[in-house]
Amino acid sequence: MPDTMNSPSFLPEPFDCVVIGDSPLLAECVRHLLDQGNRIGAVVTADPDLRAWAEGLHLPLETFDGGLVERLSGRPVDYLFSIANLRILPQALLDLPRRLAINFHDGPLPRHAGLFATSWAIIDGDRLHGVTWHVMTAEADAGDILEQRAVAVADDDTAWSLNARCLEAGAASCAALIAGLRQGTVVPRPQDLSQRTYHGRTDGPPDGGVLSWDRPGEALAAHVRACRFGPHPNGFGDALLDLGRDMVIVGEAWATSSRSGAEPGTILGIVGEYLTVATSGTDVRVGGFQSLEGAPFPVADLVSRHGLAVGLRLPGATAAQREERRQRARVLARHEAVWVDRLARRHPLRFDGREFAAGPGVAPDWTLPPASLRELRPDRPEVAVLAAFLAFLVRLCGPEFRIGLSGWSGRWSADPAIGPDDPVIAADWPLVPPSMADGATLGVLAARVAEDLATLGAHPGYRRPALARHPRLRPGGAADPQSWPVAVALVAQREDPPPEGAGIPRDGLLLRISVRDGAWRFAGPAGDGTLAGAFQRRFGAFLETASPEADPWLLPLMDATERQTMLTDWCGETTDEASAPAVQDLVAAAIRRHPDRIAIRAGDQSESYGALGRRIDRRREEIARSGVRSGGRVAVYLDRSIDLPATLLAVLGLGAAYVPLDPIFPARRIADILEDAGVDAVVTERALLDTLPPGCPAPVVVIDDPEVASPVLPAVAPDPGDGARAGAAPDGLAYVIFTSGSTGRPKGVEVLHRGLSNLLLSIGRRLGFTSAHRFAAVTTVTFDIAALELFLPLIAGGELDLLSRDTAADGIALAAHLAHRKPDVMQATPATWRMLLAAGWDGDPDLTLLCGGERLPDDLAALLCNRVRAAWNMYGPTETTIWSSMARLVPNGRITIGRPIANTRFLVLDERMQLLPPGIPGELYIGGDGLAAGYNGRPDLTARAFVADPFGAGRLYRTGDRAVWAANGEMLFLGRLDAQVKLRGYRIELGEIETALRRHPGVADAAVQLHDGGARGAELIAYAVAASGAALPPDLRNFLRGQLPDYAVPSRVVQLAALPRLSNGKLDRSRLRPAGGAARPEAGTSGGAGPAVSDPVAAAISAIWCAVLATDGVGLDENFFDAGGNSLLLTELVVRLNREMAAAITRMDMFRFPTIRTMAAHLGSRAAETGPAFSQSASVERRRRLDLLQRRGR
């Protein structure tokens, strides 16, 4: 082995290297490598945060697999660094570097070689530990030592805290090692292997992890601390308290100063959440109890469930029993990684059966599967039924789940010594569905399930505490009390009960399958047969036509009776409204009925029906002179006056379709629409003429300046005076309205007369709107719902109250207008209703309120329905003509979108366009007379969105909305399918997070977006509006943690004065940018003693925090991790604090002083210290910089 820089093992020049590992230490070492001018040929890691970080630095990424050596062999590699890497590297990889393969070990070799060195140091009572960089050889951790650093062990150290200091020592020694390699000063030192101690993966804590009271208190406390890994995975083992028939996890322990002399295991005291127990030495106090799955277990529950009392002696174990526990733990440890990976890849299924269970059901009874299915596996009929049930669940819930399986005969075959009588071992099996993505038949799925069972039979099981020891297995958030776990139990015969202690959910759904004949039967939660009955009926329908050759995606999820209910009974009623006259003819009829009645009020102007008819005729004649004929298209570019509805009706009276334009649109968008729509004329007014884009592609008609438009045609025939013309064909276009397209190019929806007439008459009938009513119109004409406001009052002979743009956009002015005009009906988006409430609007007991355009939040619905006569939740895409359904809101009731309006039907379908039963979410499809013709000039887009109805004649529109049938035939809207995002492998519904935020009384409105954070990785960012109009509450993220899994809690909350909106009132997600300050208290306003914002130390720390967290502001008392920090950012923060403030901060300091205020106080106190505890040079430099900061702050 070389011993000087003259050896070819050392390079005086920058070198090429590969780094392998999954710890944040890798990132810090890579920084040292790059800072010293070296080149990184590849970063090999499976950690998603490290991969995102490396991508942000544009470093080559690799995956550790069988082809790694081949892929790296063509690259220059001088050194390979294995950094906190737990994989065994093949010899071919060790031979790859031209110089050395170097490993970082978190122990002072030759002591504590192998795994979990810090845990063993604590258990052995070491006072001094250390870290080692050594040459990698075929024998693990046996190569020559290149660099070492000592690390002191504190009395209260846990594996986590000691490991954190080892990582800091590793980073510091890494920098020295790299410099030494470059300078040739590294002297390899052979290990004295006679002093070697080695710990393998299966060498867990003493006695299989169970605390033995014949050991002294110090040893027991060390055992507990050695098993505490903080937020990191713990593959070492457990600290368990034996209670006889059960055990619990112990999270805290320390030896007392007393020695009672009582029999070991005797409970000496029960105080608060701690037990004091006698041992063979000093007494020990234990606490921090958890169930074996990691749920908190209060001492009061221990006392009540297990009869604990002072003087009671806890169970002990003989030497033979302790040895048996050790051997079991070793066997299970060998297999734990397999089970952890399997458990982590799927979430435990909790079925929300509220709607599913309320549907039709049957009394659960034993049912035989079809003969063809039983014959698939005559020797194992239960496997065929099990495969079918898994396929059934995939159809209902998707493939990302696992359920518990118990009673399988091969369960304990891997090792007879591992049996079902040990309470620590999980008795059920995490069963996952077979892959169904390749069109596999039911027979193929059964073979896959059988193969899966056989493969897992080689692994004897896993310890239940593994669920607590591995963070990715810990459940996040509170479980919905109205959802139930699902399990399967295999029984030898129908009469047999489920296996005892098999993890069967007491409050869940259990499917029992008889191994003898494959018969099956469901049992529901807590004896409730409704959920079980619904499953019994629908799974029976699924199996009715099942066969080995069947495609499980096409098997029915309901029987014929329920299918007929959904296809017929839950449709909108069939009426002749779709074949009614066109809207202009309906208005003409009202003009003839009520010529003297007021038709429209706009500001201080009003017009009777008779005058309106004459105005329509004039406008029609003016437009006709420009060359417009039946079938043409006319862009209407007018402000909100009486001329707006009159001109729209005039265009329709010519048999043409109108294309609405909003004067607030940018000129570029107006030009795009005019070009795309191919209009034959543009109708505008003098005040807007100059805002039209140059080079207008069609004649311009200026209604208040007829000289602008040159006559093209001779005078038209005399007008009848009522705005009427020959009836329009139902299939003719009424209007073309442009919405935002996903490509940025607006797309024009071509709406038919049939759909518009059906909508107006159906909604009018549902509302009971008559000639005695007034409708307040506030919506821009380019939002399709404006057609309801403009035309419904006119076809009924009622009054249209047309508000100006300024009034409609001003909450105070709008509230005053409503109080003055007293309309009977008003329609608006949720944003407008919120604006009204914020302006102090108290409601109107005579008002009927329509709310739609986007999802109606629960809190807003509660505020609205108690303020008006009737409040309706409206739903409908532009492509199905404004509204397709409506539901009346009930105080404290559930918000639905109701049932379809007349001549409309809803279907909830899966990806294969198969009907889904109530309670099962899918994509909402809409059929009926409201469907638009398609998209203007976009046949490809039309073909994708408007599809053939597989259940009847006609077409269906794919809404892209996620919805679910309620058991009563009403529809629940769940949000957009494209609002579902995936973060670190988890599927997340943004709407769920937004709803949770709005539940906080301090939040008025909220939105959530997933942003690409570059080197930070993807992150969820919440945008919120404070209810008080001042500052958001500082506890929002903690509030969310109580409702959502950790992965769904946004990393940041950004406060906005208002959410960005489109002109139609809908949320404009494109303007939700990741930049901007987070919703945190200002540094100078957070309470408590300590540095104020003027403190230059706190200001300097704050600037570094903000740079690392990529935010504009962090509160003085906000925890770094609550502010969006993670392990990688923590490393960066420590590096920058030390570099820019000449500090000597460690990672553990960040846990001790996790806020700007506490860190500033810590640095200030450290700066005042003198003595040997400080490095003198660092202390001088730190004082110099702090003095400079103080002078700048004066």
Image (cartoon, rainbow, N blue to C red):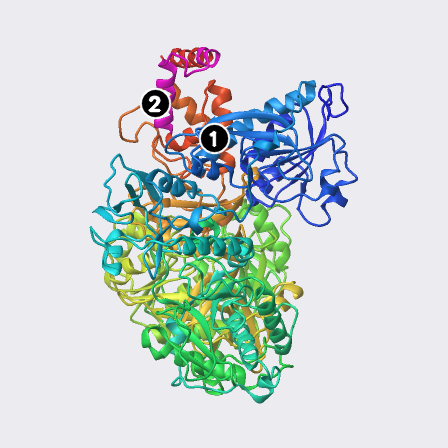
Q: Which mark is residue 180?
A: none
Residue 11, visible in the rendered structure: yes
Q: Which mark is residue 1161?
A: 2
Q: Which of these two is toward me, 33 or 686?
A: 33
Percent of width and height locating residue 1078: 41, 38
SS of the residue at dot 2?
A: helix
Helix, strand or loop: magenta stretch: helix
> Which quadrant of the structure image shows residue 769?
bottom left
What is the span of residues highlighted in magenta in the rendered image?
Answer: 1155-1180
Residue 142 counted in the magenta span: no
> Residue at horizontal 60%, vertical 72%?
450
Instruction: Indicate the amino acid at tag 1.
Output: Arg
Q: CA distance from mark 1 to mark 2?
A: 22 Å
Q: Which of these two is toward me, 371 or 949?
A: 371
Instruction: Indicate the amino acid at tag 2.
Output: Ala
> Residue at horizontal 27%, vertical 45%?
278
Looking at this view, name the residue that lies furthest to the front. Answer: 319
Answer yes or no: do the residues labelled 1 and 2 have beta carbons within 8 Å?
Answer: no
Percent of width and height locating residue 743: 61, 53
Q: Quadrant of the C terminus?
A: top left
> Which quadrant of the structure image shows residue 534?
bottom left
Q: Is residue 277 above or below residue 194?
A: below
Locate residue 126 relative to residue 655 in the image: left or right.
left
Residue 475, visible in the rendered structure: no
Mark 1 lies on residue: 165
Looking at this view, name the residue that lies furthest to the bottom. Answer: 371
Q: Quadrant of the N terminus?
A: top right
Total label count? Answer: 2
